Amino acid sequence: MVCMVSRTGRHLQRYDNLGRRQVVGCIPYRYKSSSDGTMTDDLEVLVISSQKCQKMMFPKGGWELDESREEAALRESLEEAGVLGNVEMNVKEARDVCQHWWMKEALDILVERLNSLKQQNEQNYPNICSDLVAKISSL
């Protein structure tokens, strides 16, 4: 279990040249496990409700001067979504509840990248599972 105090104040916030606050976010996801513990192709993503308006969105927040984008995204996901719970929304359901076009676009890009990586791995390592099973069986 991790205990973390959320950052407060705006003195470290990043702003662009038009004075707009810079934010980062993430799309927490996982592949669903089947009842026997094996991974399936079903992708689950986490959306959270906003405290201000109860709209569903991905964890996001201010990007501060003393952190990289990655550090800020990790911090925001922990601050905003770092709770234990059940994931019940699949990608289609998550996309349906996204309130902003940029959330839908980010989710589409994530799914496209994950599918592309999966296809590359299947092409590069088509027999890796059967090879591993054969090696384990021979021991």
Image (tube, rainbow, N blue to C red):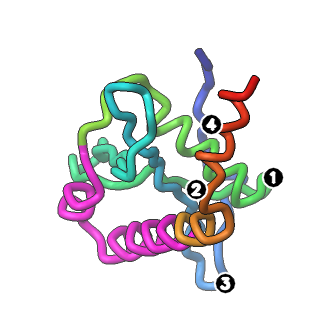
Rendering coords of residue 16 (x, y %): 65, 78
Q: Residues within 10 Å of mark 2 (few under 14, many from 20)?
A: many
How far apart are the alpha carbons under marks 4 and 2?
A: 47 Å
Q: Is residue 129 magenta?
A: no
Secondary structure beneath disc 2?
strand
Closest to the observer, 94 or 112: 112
According to the picture, the residue beneath numbered tag 1 turns out to be 66
Q: Quadrant of residue 38?
A: top left
Q: Residue furthest bottom?
A: 18
Of marks 4 and 2, the one in the foreground: 4
Q: Nearer the viewer, mark 1 or mark 3?
A: 1
For badge 1, the amino acid type reads Asp
The residue sitting at the front extreme is: 138
What main secondary structure does the magenta stretch of the protein show? helix
Q: Which mark is residue 133?
A: 4
- Mark 4 or mark 3, which is nearer to you? 4
The quadrant where residue 3 appears: top right
Secondary structure of residue under mark 1: loop
Give whichever of discs 4 and 3 has the lower sequence position.
3
| Left or right of residue 93: residue 27 | right
Q: Which quarter of the picture shows residue 76?
A: top right
Question: Looking at the image, which residue is at 33% across and 48% down?
Answer: 47
Of mark 2 and mark 3, the one earlier in the sequence is 3
Identify the mark at residue 17; answer none if there is no mark: 3
* Residue in the image at 53% along x and 43% along y: 77
Q: Are marks 1 and 3 in contact (CB under 8 Å)?
A: no
Q: Which residues are magenta?
A: 89-117
Could you say which disc has been placed on residue 62 in the image? 2
